[in-house]
């Protein structure tokens, strides 16, 4: 059974800092990994999608890497801003076993960027 | 292009009742997935529909069911509601419904069971 873990659970940083969020997963049989952002009481906003054959994806100040063999992904946020404050979730799409085709989510990292 | 829409946005029900939630995917998307989000369990996969057929299913009791219509709109039904069913229910759509596709989520339906 696929399990996804995100570290740290919460992070508070001053504006302007570069930061790294970590995601690990137990089963390397995945189709892709997706990073999302969720604001309180709202739905999920897709940030980046990395296919299993890719190593990284970039969008603006965001960069996500994937090391499928070791079961790890990182989300790098450059020059953080107060508007980045949200919960960040990673999810993997299973490619085998009972996780086939399903998105399995981590518990999220709650990010607070203070002015 | 309009995003994924869900109705209603908020619902209050009592134990034992049943509820139906609706999801309209992004135009052209053919796959719709449903998720339950609670503070204790986080986000959990319920089921996925493609071309009016359930393609995948999570580990939820039979009280949770769904369907998809020919226009790709989907409904989710929960019968005999329990207090533990209180959650944010999210649906997501993707195109062209392959395993490699990015999922786009709606704003969710907040269900409260009293």
Image (tube, rainbow, N blue to C red):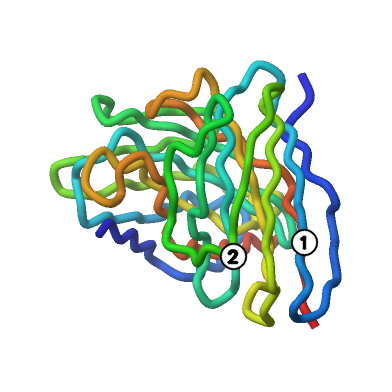
Establish if A2 lies above or below A70: below
In the image, residue A99 sits, relative to residue B59, either above or below, namely above
Check residue B63 in the rendering and tell me which mark sits there, or answer none: 2
Residue drawn where x is 78% and y is 38% of the image: B5
Residue A88, how many percent across, how many down? 53, 54
Disc 2 is placed on an element classified as loop
- For marks 2 and 1, give the CA distance: 11 Å
Left or right of A20 in this view: B74: right
- Tell whether A34 sits left or right of A3: right
Q: Position of residue B85 (x, y in %)?
A: 65, 73
Tell me: residue B13, above or below residue A50: below
Residue B19, which numbered label?
Answer: 1
Q: At x 68% / y 30%, what residue is drawn?
A: B69
Residue A51 found in image quarter: top left
Q: Residue at x 27, y 51 (%)?
A: A98
Q: Pick the residue in front: A66 or B45.
A: B45
Of B87 and A5, which appears nearest the observer? B87
Residues at discs 2 and 1 both on one chain: yes
Check whether the beta carbons of the residues at disc 2 and disc 1 lie within 8 A of each other. no
Q: Can you say which quadrant of the picture contains the N terminus of chain A?
A: bottom left
Where residue B79 sits, quadrant-wise, is: bottom right
Q: Mark 1 — on which chain does it sit?
A: B
Q: Residue furthest left?
A: A69
């Amino acid at each position: 059974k696929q399990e996804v873990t995100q570290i740290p659970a919460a992070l508070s940083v001053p504006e302007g800092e570069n930061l790294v969020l970590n995601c690990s997963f137990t089963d390397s049989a995945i189709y892709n990994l997706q990073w999302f952002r969720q604001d309180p009481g709202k739905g999920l906003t897709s940030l980046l999608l990395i296919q299993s054959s890719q190593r990284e994806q970039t969008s603006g100040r965001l960069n996500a890497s994937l090391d499928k063999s070791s079961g790890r992904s990182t989300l790098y946020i450059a020059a953080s801003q107060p508007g980045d404050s949200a919960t960040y979730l990673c999810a993997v799409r299973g490619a085998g076993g009972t996780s086939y085709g399903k998105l399995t989510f981590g518990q999220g990292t709650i990010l607070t960027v203070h002015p | 292009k309009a995003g994924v829409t869900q109705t209603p946005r908020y619902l209050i029900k009592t134990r034992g009742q049943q509820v139906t939630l609706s999801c309209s995917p992004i135009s052209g998307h053919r796959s719709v997935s449903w998720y339950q989000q609670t503070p204790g369990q986080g986000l959990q996969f319920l089921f996925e529909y493609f071309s009016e057929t359930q393609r995948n299913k999570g580990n939820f009791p039979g009280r949770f069911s769904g369907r998809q219509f020919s226009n790709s709109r989907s409904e989710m039904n929960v019968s005999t509601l329990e207090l533990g069913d209180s959650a944010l229910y999210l649906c997501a759509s993707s195109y062209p419904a392959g395993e490699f596709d990015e999922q786009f989520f709606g704003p969710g339906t907040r269900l409260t069971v009293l």
